[in-house]
Amino acid sequence: MKDPIAKPLLLAALLLAALPGAAQAQAQSPSWPGAKPITLIVPYSAGGSVDFNARLVATRLGERLKQSVVIENVTGAGGAIGVGKAVNAAPDGYTLVAGPDSAIAIGRLINPAAFKFDPLKDLAPVGMLNTAPLVLVARPGLPVKDFADFVKLAKASPGKYNYATSGVGTVLQLAMELLKERTGIFVTHVPYRGGAQIATDVIGNQVDLAMLVSTSAIPHVSGNRLKPLGVTSARRLDALPQVPAFGEMAGLKGFEMVSWTGIFAPANTPAPIVSRLNQELNAVLNDPEVRAKLQEQGAVPGSGSPEQLGQFVKAEYARNQKIVQAANIKE
């Protein structure tokens, strides 16, 4: 006689065995994105380079996801308020943030009261949006022809010369402070509120040097209005082939610092959503038209996996922490 309980038990066992696979399939094919629009927070005001690049990518990302990707400018506290809003958002794939270097890998080191979140724990890396090299430029009347000349000049008169950046705790300041440490020179930091006036003042010989993002520097260098002393990327810029990279100079081997912006989601956003976002972001950044528009802004289109961005941010944070401590940089 057949056991009447055996068949139901067998069916139950088969169903239980199938559950992990079913759950995995469901996780790999979530209903996201649904009818709800995706918000991409830009922690700065509209009109800047971070905003421009984020809007460019948001439009194309929305087309690929067949869902609106809406830019929300949330300003204040050097990016802390905007990034903080993303940190506190639901980890459901509907809130992202265009996180720049200063807000992700510097701000908490110099102003922990404002940057109460931990970028290494409270954000899920999605992918790199873009990087941009920096260019050190000198005023027209400064009697130097290259960076080696300036080092000699600065060592002969410690504290006499100054340099401008767009603010305290920016990657621009950290790059110059690292150059100071590596070369043993002392020049005074002149922080501006934003970068619009800096080039004008350097061209007018009111400030000796400025560390500028390549976007801002290239037009003035190409127009012979500013003297270029070096670029902070690993190799020379295609737009400025005559300007050496600092890493190829004596005593500065391996020197490299760039401005960058990554796309991040709140921590604990489901891995399949992060993976899909990364896949679509990389596809957008590989589009020839998008690449051309980013490059027109002096930016290098990003690439890579979420894991690679995560490792990059950790390395940036660790290096920046050493620079901030050595130079005693405070907000």
Image (spheres, rainbow, N blue to C red):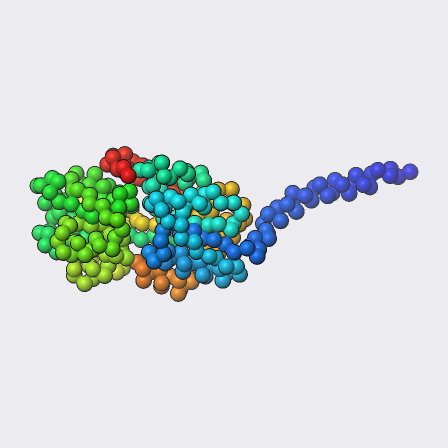
Image location (x, y in percent) of residue 40: 45, 53
Q: Residue at x 78, y 40 (%)?
A: 10
Count how many numbered circles sit on residues in the image. Answer: 0
Q: Is residue 249 visible?
A: no
Q: Residue at x 26, y 37 (%)?
A: 329
Image location (x, y in percent) of residue 91: 52, 45
Q: Nearer the viewer, residue 178 or 115?
A: 115
Q: Nearer the viewer, residue 247 or 294?
A: 294
Image location (x, y in percent) of residue 178: 24, 41
Image location (x, y in percent) of residue 227: 16, 55
Q: Residue at x 44, y 47 (%)?
A: 264
Residue, far bottom: 289
Considering only vertical position in the picture, is 291 above or below 83?
A: below
Quadrant of res 156: top left
Q: Residue at x 52, y 59 (%)?
A: 67
Considering only vertical position in the picture, is 73 above or below 252?
A: below
Quadrant of res 17: top right
